[in-house]
Amino acid sequence: MKIATYQMDIVPGKPAENRKKVLNWVGQVCKDQQPDVLVLPEMWTTAYTLSTLGEVVKEDKRESESFLKKVANDNRVNVVAGSIALEEDGEIVNRSYILNREGDIIHTYDKIHLVPMLDEHRYLKGGNSAVQVFELDGHKMGVIICYDLRFPELVRSLALQGAEVVFVVAEWPSARANHWEILQQARAIENQLFIVSCNRIGTYDDVEFAGLSMVVSPWGEVLEKASLLLEEETLSTTLDLNEVTRIRKEVPVFASRVPKLYGDL
């Protein structure tokens, strides 16, 4: 399975400008590489313009959702569409979209863990539904958003549901870049699956974002890693999903689990 990840800078509070950037990228990468899956970062339409998100999402009027459907269908490509700020019932959620090659939204996930360091809880409503796997081209996968990476229960839940790949879409700051790298490798090793991350670059509101989008194997090897901080780039890799089965046979972690002795998790 061939995956192309867009490590992009984001124009703050300007969904139309960011859609134009993404459209240009999609056209080029699909022409040159014919990927099976495209991956975008967290909040790619707006960036973390939290104090003005209410106004921006009203102006957007779900145009970004329609845009994603057209991108997937026109290019016959699966899309892990990062996440988008969306208003529902008077509150704003940080929602990830998964689309198949026909442009159908086959899965959504609202970010559960809100970042206290950014006062996200003042502006966003956390998701209240458990993580679930979805299927792309017959393979089970999952998605989490940024700060969720610090909570191993989420990826373990997806692994127990049969996930072979977990996507991590993010706006992770450079101040904690070492955590970003180490946690991805840990989640991959402990769950024996591929981790594919897409982080943004650039600076907003005095926060510098790390980049360092990655692909980590079920053995914990970093197969691909984008640049730190400065460059927009495409990270391309082909995943051999048979590796998940092979490694889970070699080191049978899941068969060795004794959940009844783990207490209240």
Image (spheres, grey):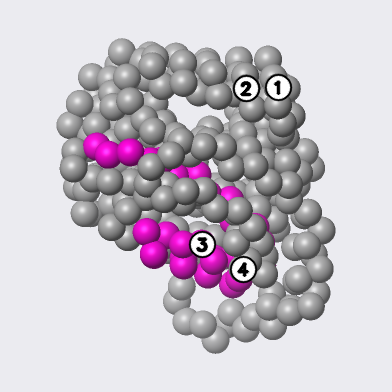
**Sequence order check: which comes first, mark 3 or mark 4?**
3
Find the magenta span and give its range. 177-204
The answer to whether mark 2 and mark 1 are in CB contact below 8 A is yes
Quarter of the rendering occupied by the N terminus = top right
Between 32 and 4, the one lying in front of the other is 32
**Sequence order check: which comes first, mark 3 or mark 1?**
1
**Sequence order check: which comes first, mark 3 or mark 2?**
2
The answer to whether mark 3 and mark 4 are in CB contact below 8 A is no
Q: Could you say which quadrant of the image residue 191 lies in?
A: bottom right
Label 1 Cα neighbours within 10 Å, binned few <14 / some 14-19 / many ≥20: few
**Sequence order check: which comes first, mark 4 or mark 2?**
2
Which residue does the numbered mark 4 point to in the structure image?
A: 220
Q: Amino acid at mark 1?
A: Lys
* The disc label shown at residue 184, or none: 3
Between 28 and 89, the one lying in front of the other is 28
Which element is circle 3 on? helix
Which residue does the numbered mark 2 point to in the structure image?
A: 28
> How far, Cα to Cα, is label 3 from label 2?
28 Å
Label 4 Cα neighbours within 10 Å, binned few <14 / some 14-19 / many ≥20: many
Specify whether residue 264 is in view. yes
Which element is circle 2 on? helix
